[in-house]
Image: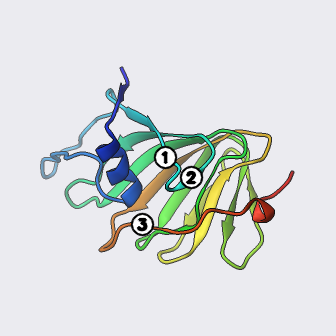
Amino acid sequence: MKRIFTAALAAALLAGAPAMAADWPAGQMVVSGADITSAWAGADHFTGRVRMESLFPAAGDFQAYGARVTFEPGARTHWHIHPAGQVLIVTDGAGYTKEWGRPAVRLRPGDVVRCPPGVKHWHGAGPKTAMTHIAISEIGSAPVAWLEPVKDSGYPKD
C-alpha cells in the first residue's frame, strides 16, 4: 500500500536528506519496499508535473537514498548540483539530461547517467513523452543546490 507523505518529507528528499529514519542492524541485510511513499513534486524545483516515490533512505554506512521519479511530457528538473553525485537509471519512456555548457543527451529505457559531484545539470521527460527514472543520490556535506528553471528556449523540441 502506498501512502502520501507530508510536505516536510518531500522537502527532505528534494534537499538530499534522508527521507525517513531507518535502522540497519550491523552485518544484517534489510528488505524493505512494502510501504513506498509518494508525492507530487513542487514548482520550487521542477517545471511541469513530476511524481516522486521514495524507495529507500540513507541509513548506517550506506549514505545514499533512492527515488523513482516520473516526469509527465514536458516536465523537468530545474538546474541543480548534487555535491556528492547522482546516478539515474531510466526505466520507462524517453527524455533528456543536460550538463551546463554541453548539448542535451536523449535518454531511453536502460540508459544509466552518472553525474559526478558538483556538476550543474537537469533531467526530465521529452516534450511529447513521459519518462521515469530511478535516482540514487549520495548524501554529501551540503544539500542539493537547486538553481534556476530550465528555459523553454533551452529545452529540446523533439
- The first of marks 3 and 1 along the sequence is 1
Image location (x, y in percent) of residue 123: 63, 57
- The first of marks 2 and 3 along the sequence is 2
Which circle, 3 or 1, is nearer the viewer? 1
Q: Is residue 91 left or right of residue 13?
A: right
The reply to whether the C-beta atoms of the residues labelled 2 and 1 are less than 8 Å apart is yes
The residue at 19%/47% (across/down) is 21
The quarter of the rendered structure image containing the N terminus is top left
Q: Estimate the spatial distance between the alpha carbons at disc 3 and disc 1, rounded to whole Å.
A: 15 Å
Circle 2 SS class: strand
Disc 2 marks which residue? 46
Taking the view exactly as shown, the residue that stands out farthest to the right is: 158
In the rendered image, the vertical position of residue 128 relative to residue 122, given as above or below: above
The residue at 29%/74% (across/down) is 141
Q: Residues within 10 Å of mark 3 (few under 14, many from 20)?
A: many
Disc 3 marks which residue? 144
Q: Estimate the spatial distance between the alpha carbons at disc 2 and disc 1, rounded to whole Å.
A: 6 Å
Image location (x, y in percent) of residue 63: 29, 61
Residue 65 versus residue 146: which sits nearer the camera? 146
Residue type, label 2: Phe
Disc 1 marks which residue? 42
Which circle, 2 or 3, is nearer the viewer? 2
Residue 73 versus residue 113: which sits nearer the camera? 73
Residue type, label 1: Gly
